[in-house]
Amino acid sequence: MDALNPLNPETLDQAPAILRKQGWAMISAPTLSNWLHTDQATLDALHASWNDLPPDLHLRDGGHYRFRRHSCFTLDTQTGTLTQTPHRAHWQPVTYNALHGGFERWFEPMAEQVSQHPVWQALLSQIGMLLAQAKPTPAWYIEAHQFRVDTTGGIGRPTPEGAHRDGVDFVAVLMLARHQVKGGETRVFEADGPHGVRFTLQEPWSTLLLDDERVIHESTPIQPLGEHGWRDTLVLTFRRGGYQGPA
């Protein structure tokens, strides 16, 4: 796999080809901001909602380090129309998530002021349209997860299930903030090969795109550097044909 080389405005249109070539691509934070026609103050206002995430009550490792909200959307790639769907459970098969798969997980929905915000709508729509260039589809079924992983108990695990795939077509991981933590290294490896890359997402709103059929990914645990450390991310999954659910 190629070395970490975030896309800039001049190379953003190369993202579909890069995804087809290596299974992942990075978008720099300034590129994302320019692409969405927004500014840092607006992005900071969206990020403020991460301070109001309820605890994840479904952790099966006994931890209390994760907070999240979850909502679902559809994107018509012919018209660019984004629609929020009725609230639903998050479900994954055990083949993709041995720790938390096989049962419905209900989380509180995202706040309306986030899900209806013009920049939020642009974020999902433009990423979805870009991904449709890499893998054509008439529609994307999108799940959005707001995550805060903290170190109250001494350690936080962004991916307690370990290195994994999500059972979708594409995953977008957006780094929102790191506060007084060390660790949280991102690792991306070929699903059917020996090659991979390791790096730590640092810059707020830097974006990692993953072809979930071609690569596996994980983030290492975080540890505190002060009294209270945490790591905020936004994870978006894009799937053709419908949402995952019990057979």
Image (spheres, rainbow, N blue to C red):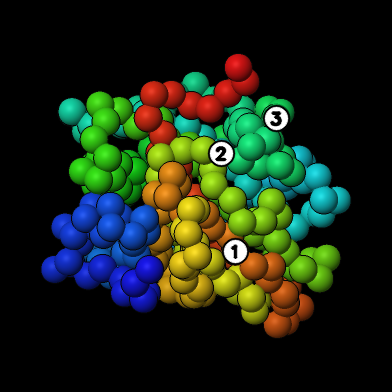
Q: Which of disc 2 and disc 1 is earlier in sequence?
A: 2
- The reply to whether residue 132 is in sight is yes
Numbered marks: total: 3
- Horizontal relation, residue 241 to residue 101: left or right: left
User: Circles 3 and 2: CB distance less than 8 Å?
Assistant: no
List the residue tagged with mark 3: 102
Residue located at (53% from left, 27% from top): 244
Residue located at (25% from left, 26% from top): 138
- Horizontal relation, residue 129 to residue 44: left or right: left
Could you tell me the amino acid type at mark 1?
A: Ser
- The reply to whether residue 122 is in sight is no
How packed is label 2: few (under 14 Cα within 10 Å), some, or many (20 or more)?
Answer: many
Residue located at (41% from left, 53% from top): 210
| Place of residue 208 in the rendered image (x, y in percent of width and height, measured from the top left) | 40, 60
Q: Secondary structure at mark 2?
A: strand
Identify the image quadrant of residue 28: bottom left
Vertical arrangement, residue 9 with respect to residue 81, above or below: below
| Place of residue 172 in the rendered image (x, y in percent of width and height, measured from the top left) | 42, 52
Q: Secondary structure at mark 3?
A: loop
Vertical arrangement, residue 12 with respect to residue 55, above or below: below
Vertical arrangement, residue 16 with respect to residue 106, above or below: below
- Which disc, if any, is residue 219? 1
List the residue tagged with mark 2: 70
| Place of residue 63 in the rendered image (x, y in percent of width and height, measured from the top left) | 82, 54
Q: Nearer the viewer, residue 8 or 197?
A: 197
Residue located at (70% from left, 61% from top): 157
Query: Which callout, 1 or 2, points to the residue nearer the camera?
Result: 1
Q: CA distance from mark 3 to mark 1?
A: 22 Å
How packed is label 1: few (under 14 Cα within 10 Å), some, or many (20 or more)?
Answer: many
Q: Which of disc 2 and disc 3 is earlier in sequence?
A: 2
